[in-house]
Amino acid sequence: MGIQPNSVRTLSRAELARLTGQRSLLRRSIGWAVGLVFFGLCLAVVLASVQAQSGATATVLGIAASVVVLGIVVPVFLWLDRFEPEPKGMLLFAFLWGACVATLGAALLNEVGGYLLGATGESDPLVAILVAPPVEESLKGFALLLLLVFRRREIDGVLDGMVYAGLCAAGFAFVEDIVYLANGYADSGEQGLVGTFVVRVLMSPFAHPMFTICTGIGIGVAATSPGFLMRVVPPLVGLVCAIVLHSGWNTLAILSEQGWLVAYVLLQVPLFCAFVALLLVARRRESAKIGEQLSAYVDTAWLSPPEVRMLASMGERRYARAWAKAHGGSQLRRQMVQFQDVAGELAMLRARMMRGDVSHDSRAREQLLLEALWVLRRPFLGTALYRGVEWAPIGRRTPGLG
């Protein structure tokens, strides 16, 4: 059965905004304007400080070399966020907070902490081990705390906390590396720039995300747990773990200056492998959660088993998008993407409802998402989409939570 052009029904921006609970265009525009000015001023102060210390040429080279960090780290956390994408504004907020606010605050507070300890500067071992870890992890963690307080409903579990933490840390690492790269060039020319680039950008681009992700896990647990203690203790435990890990990493780097390659291979590489394994496990659990929650809509005839299997597998999602483009062009592919995104949002909403959020607003939003799901999937019904398995048209009944 072919796709009929008049059956394609992508949702408008207004309809998607209503489903995802976004604010009005005016409020969003004002928020973006205020945020960009605030973050821009913070970043300008940081870069002006780097230029004053290392010179314009060193700063430009530092920026150009540090961009590599973004190309390595950011795609990993966007990949982690593919099943149920977080709002772009929140993702950008986390990144800009790390890049602009946390770096500026760390530059000031590290100086103050070093002065109180009698250290001579940020490169002093005391600053690196005792001051920088609690200061930097607290500043990065504060962004996650703001998201937990003001946008808690958007954080659906540990994986979301990890994504926000990783992007915040990526922003911080990006600007911090500019400082180190510029200093390396100012002190030792091209040799200093290349040496710093290899050690900080190529060999340990995920250092800061590995630390801050501990706080992100705690935030994810707090966002999905009832009770005061479970909303306070996990973020604090996560922050402490992030500080200890950060301090241990810096300590190892200082102690192994003569044998840094051995320490890197024997300790830092295994730690990175554990970090990668954690990301893979978190993504697999997200896949299983989506499949489990959407399966409830099979019995009530809103989805078919092949659709649930497709929606719970990133490989099958990619196949479905490619199939849609081949049979209906870019417009049908966009509809498939919307169908997958709405299904992911529905799965996370149902997970929250199963944890006890059965308010009228939640039930009303569930109904809206189900109606959107039905509209978006209409062109695909009865087609050989799921690798030879027919998507037969089915009826609809109101789902239950039993």
Image (cartoon, rainbow, N blue to C red):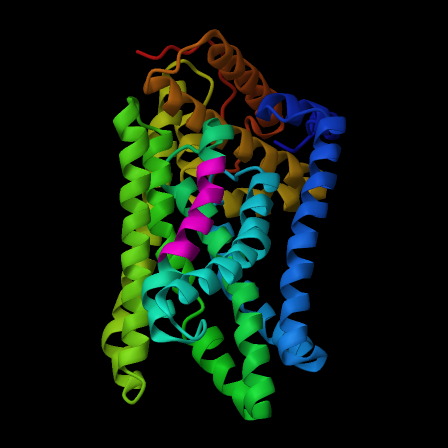
Image-quadrant location for residue 336: top right
Q: Quadrant of the N terminus?
A: top right
Is residue 141 within the magenta segment? yes
Residue 31 in picture, x, y percent from top left: 69, 35
Q: Is residue 238 visible?
A: yes
Q: Residue at x 54, y 20 (%)?
A: 369
Determine the main secondary structure of the stretch shown in magenta. Answer: helix
Foreground pick, 236 / 315 = 236
Q: Is residue 34 left or right of residue 50?
A: right
Q: Is residue 104 left or right of residue 214?
A: right
Residue 87 in picture, x, y percent from top left: 57, 37
Taking 94 as reference, is 126 above or below it? Answer: below
Taking 366 as reference, is 70 above or below it? Answer: below
Residue 214 in picture, x, y percent from top left: 33, 50
Q: Residue at x 26, y 28 (%)?
A: 229
Count of all numbered marks drawn on residues in the image: 0
Residue 55 in picture, x, y percent from top left: 68, 80
Which residue range is magenta in the image?
Answer: 134-146
Q: Quadrant of the C terminus?
A: top left
Foreground pick, 160 / 301 = 160
Q: Residue at x 70, y 32 (%)?
A: 28
Q: Residue at x 57, y 15 (%)?
A: 368
Foreground pick, 279 / 271 = 271
